[in-house]
Amino acid sequence: MRLEILYFAAVRELVGTDREVRETAASTVAALAAELEEAHPALRGRLAQVRFAVNEAFAEDSTALSDGDVVALIPPVAGGSDRAPAEARVAIRETPLRYDDVLDLVRHPSAGALATFVGVVRDHHEGRAVTALEYSAYASMAIKEMARIVAEIESEIPVVRLAAHHRVGELKVGEEAIICAASAPHRGEAFEAGRLLIDRIKERVPVWKRERGPDGEWWVGWEDARCTPGHHHHHDEHE
């Protein structure tokens, strides 16, 4: 299908044009973003700060694209602080996560401490071998809830800046499922905020895990929920 891509301000300078017509098979904003990063290397690591609009309405990573759509890449607008809005610092990605992309979202000159958490798919769970794992998400709600958590913690600990990218789709053992980053003037606040961030994401964000192994497939958290009727049970982390 054919899309019209519009570039503005700082993004236009990186790409070198304000408009292009692109033939693409990308069916979602996330897929298009990955394609644009390949086509325009200057964009790599920068799109987490960019909001996408489709036909003049802000879009999520999961927004579907249709032939003839006009897609705009909108960098942070004037009037905000130097801190990108929480929505620009969280993401659900179908492609492999990039550590530097997340870290770059929290770096700033006053931050003397950067703390990160990387959740990786492991090869076992409660005695069962795991060979692969599939993450699925209610993506639009997941992004909103992650942004809400980031804003909450930044309100509780005003000196910190947070970011988190979560992977969905098929992951192999050893691949990164989530990357969280926290920056602060000193390490204490960075560690505290980073731990709060991953804990709240695991408690509240609608992302599900299905593990696969020699024993078959199972949804993490579903089987043991039957053990305590009427009681909400949050399963231990896979990572």
Image: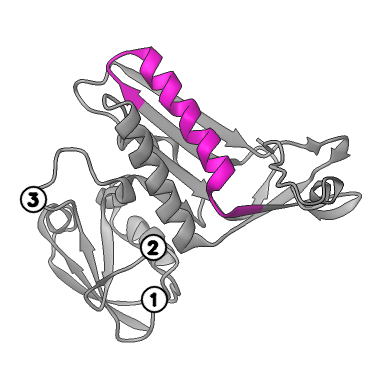
9, 81: nearer the viewer: 81
Which part of the image, by quadrant, shows the N terminus?
Answer: bottom left
97, 60: nearer the viewer: 60
Q: Is residue 169 visible in this depiction of the protein?
A: yes
Q: Is residue 86 above or below residue 143?
A: above
Decide if residue 38 is on the left or right side of residue 17.
Answer: right
Distance of label 1 from label 3 (alpha carbons): 31 Å
Q: Which residue is mark 2?
A: 35
Q: Residue at the location (44% across, 51% down)?
A: 145
> For residue 228, what is the image quadrant?
top right
Name the residue type under label 1: Thr
- Considering the whole magenta stretch, tell me its main secondary structure: helix
Which part of the image, by quadrant, shows the C terminus?
Answer: top right
Residue 28 percent across, percent down from the top left: 43, 70
Q: Earlier in the sequence, mark 3 or mark 2?
A: 2
Q: Secondary structure at mark 3?
A: loop
Q: Secondary structure at mark 2?
A: helix
Q: Which region is colored magenta?
A: 183-208
Q: Which residue is mark 3?
A: 78
Q: Which residue is mark 1?
A: 24
Q: Earlier in the sequence, mark 1 or mark 2?
A: 1
Q: Is residue 206 above or below residue 236?
A: below
Distance of label 1 from label 2 (alpha carbons): 9 Å
Residue 4 percent across, percent down from the top left: 24, 78
Name the residue type under label 3: Ala
Residue 130 percent across, percent down from the top left: 80, 43
Q: CB atoms at circles 1 and 2 under 8 Å apart?
A: yes
Decide if residue 233 is on the left or right side of residue 101.
Answer: right
Q: Is residue 102 above or below residue 183?
A: below
